[in-house]
Image (cartoon, rainbow, N blue to C red):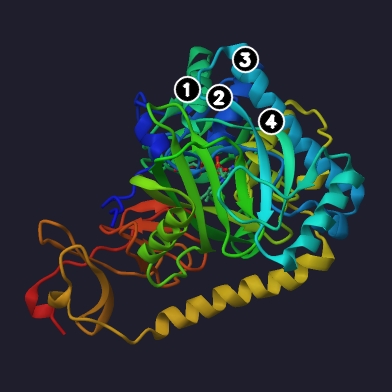
Amino acid sequence: MIQLPQFPQSYWTTSVEQPEFPKLTSDMDADVVIVGAGITGITAGYLLSKEGKKVVILEAGRILHGTTGHTTAKITAQHDLIYDELIHHFGEDKARLYYEANREALLFIRKTVEVEGIICDLADEDAYIYTQSEDTIAKLEKERRAYEKLGIAGKLTDHIDLPIAIQSALVMNNQAQFNPVLYLMALTDRIIRSNSQVFENTTAVKVEEGDCPVVVTESGNRITCQHVISASHFPFLDWKGFYFARMHAERSYVLGIRIGQEYNGGMYLSADQPKRSIRVVREGKEPLILVGGEGHKAGQSNCTIKHYETLQSFATSVFDVKEIAYRWSTQDLVTLDKLPYVGQINARTDNIFVATGYRKWGMTNGTVAAHLLKNRVLGIKDRYQDLFDPSRLHADPDIKSFVSENLNVAKELISGKLETVYRSPNSVAVGEGALVLINGKRAGAYRDPDDQLHLVDTTCTHMGCETNWNDGDRTWDCPCHGSRFSYTGEVIEGPAKKPLVKIEFAPEYEA
Ligand SMILES: Cc1cc2nc3c(=O)[nH]c(=O)nc-3n(C[C@H](O)[C@H](O)[C@H](O)COP(=O)(O)OP(=O)(O)OC[C@H]3O[C@@H](n4cnc5c(N)ncnc54)[C@H](O)[C@@H]3O)c2cc1C
């Protein structure tokens, strides 16, 4: 049996040697402060610094180590089966705008790679959504009709270049894939060669609003600017935008496998559940196949390692798997109506912007957002502004989902507090994480390979839900809004900004 790698590691972040950037240690002025250095923040920084703006990018950890460093990096406007649904909910004009925005983003990436001479394994590929079920053929046909209405080039086929018995597949030709870290490192290089700066290990914790907003960092440094862009994935502050109630985080898993057969190209996504995603990376000595899927609401899976094992079974059923070189997982945010929120953070604040909610299609949506926000900063009306406006209210799907989103959060808030199965700290084995009782109170325990027990208060510092142990990544994950913490309690992923409270262990605490 081929073993899964012991620790999760993304191919993108390990395949590229990244320079380090300093931590911010003084106050400063800038035209624009961008919080978060993923595809959104870096692309926006690149575009704005090209316009002569002095940009300061603040990154809480290392740049490109968030979702962008853990994606599968297909660059496509084929965002699952979406266009028929968009026509139904928003009408043809808006559905077409969504397609055009994402198509333009793909063309922008291609052009930028060419003009800037970036080596990032960019390759043209066709994108396919396939079904193995007769019941889904009609859905694919509906989507094809939506393509026709919107003028999207695409067709149905009964053959794909994979050893999977399909009923039908919908192809969108001339899409692309790349190495996102190589591409965005090159843009970062252009940013710092202009009048702009990038700071790592610098968490933004507050914004003092006003004509010249001031972004305050965790260590108390202040950056006075004209505009602020929250590109922090989950917005780093809510500003009465109620983002916590209008989005949920969805986690998925990826394996990087070496196979003993040819891979003829193509980027694939199954239309059926469970979702499966496949693409190839060709930049190394041997091709690496990325197999993804197993999505679930973040923090709401009891045993995350089983998702890797299920993906492994799928991969073995399709390919002659020789090695599993990488495994990793990450999460993305889904809005109530499935369209991203890009624009003013709330209706009354016109110099603080947000970009979030890409539903696992952020290579193009993040690029769209960067253009839109560049235009907002420059005072140019963007043709996509209204479509992505975070303040939009669309009665039909929104209200139902708004209620169910909040019900889900309320359920997690309550059920987490009612958890009754607790272990004793001494029973937790090396490599294991569990809920234990310390002095009669719930605590999260993890025993590291050196036999040291790490104990934390599992209550999420964002809104008080109880975090769950993620055995695949050895993290504490919040089921409500997707915050994640290391086993020592440090924030790995927001919206939480404060670490979990550590609990000192003394054997006399044993329940
Ligand atoms: C499994 C998976 C596969 C995917 N595959 C694809 C794909 O094939 N194609 C596609 O188009 N999309 C894909 N996506 C989606 C895409 O990867 C994301 O939408 C995109 O990377 C999000 O980029 P971002 O810039 O918004 O966020 P991120 O890349 O997460 O960047 C945000 C950054 O902000 C930082 N930050 C947070 N809070 C603060 C703070 N307070 N101060 C300072 N910094 C802060 C974080 O540390 C982080 O580095 C996938 C998503 C998943 C989950």
Amino acid, disc 1: Gln
Q: Residue at x 75, y 50 (%)?
A: 347
Q: Are marks 4 and 1 in contact (CB under 8 Å)?
A: no
Q: How crowded is mark 4: few (under 14 residues within 10 Å), some or many (20 or more)?
A: many
- The residue at 48%/82% (across/down) is 414
Q: Which of marks 4 and 3 precedes in the sequence?
A: 4
Q: Which of marks 1 and 3 is in front?
A: 3
Q: Position of residue 8 (x, y in %)?
A: 33, 49
Q: In this view, does 335 lie to the left or right of 510?
A: right
Asked if the residues shown at circle 2 and circle 1 are in contact, with their CB atoms under 8 angstroms apart, the answer is yes
Mark 2 CB lies closer than 8 A to ligand 1: no
Cα–Cα gap, marks 3 and 4: 13 Å
Q: How far apart are marks 4 and 2 (CA)?
A: 24 Å
Point out which mark residue 105 bears.
Answer: none
Rounded to the nearest angstrom, the CA distance separating label 3 from label 2 is 24 Å
Compared to residue 118, the image places residue 270 above or below, namely below
Q: What element carries label 4?
A: helix
Q: Name the residue under label 2.
A: 55
Tell me the CA gap for discs 2 and 1: 6 Å
Q: In which quarter of the image is residue 198?
A: top left
Q: Mark 1 points at which residue?
A: 197
Residue on which disc 3 sits: 114
Front residue of 314/262: it is 262
Q: Position of residue 358 (x, y in %)?
A: 64, 48
Q: Can residue 344 be seen in this view?
A: no
Badge 2 amino acid: Val
Name which of mark 3 and mark 2 comes first in the sequence: 2
The image's mark for residue 106 is 4
Q: Nearer the viewer, residue 504 or 298?
A: 298
Kindly state the secondary structure of the residue where label 1 is placed.
Answer: strand
Counting residues from the start of the chain, the first of labels 2 and 1 encountered is 2
Q: Which of marks 4 and 2 is nearer the N terminus?
A: 2
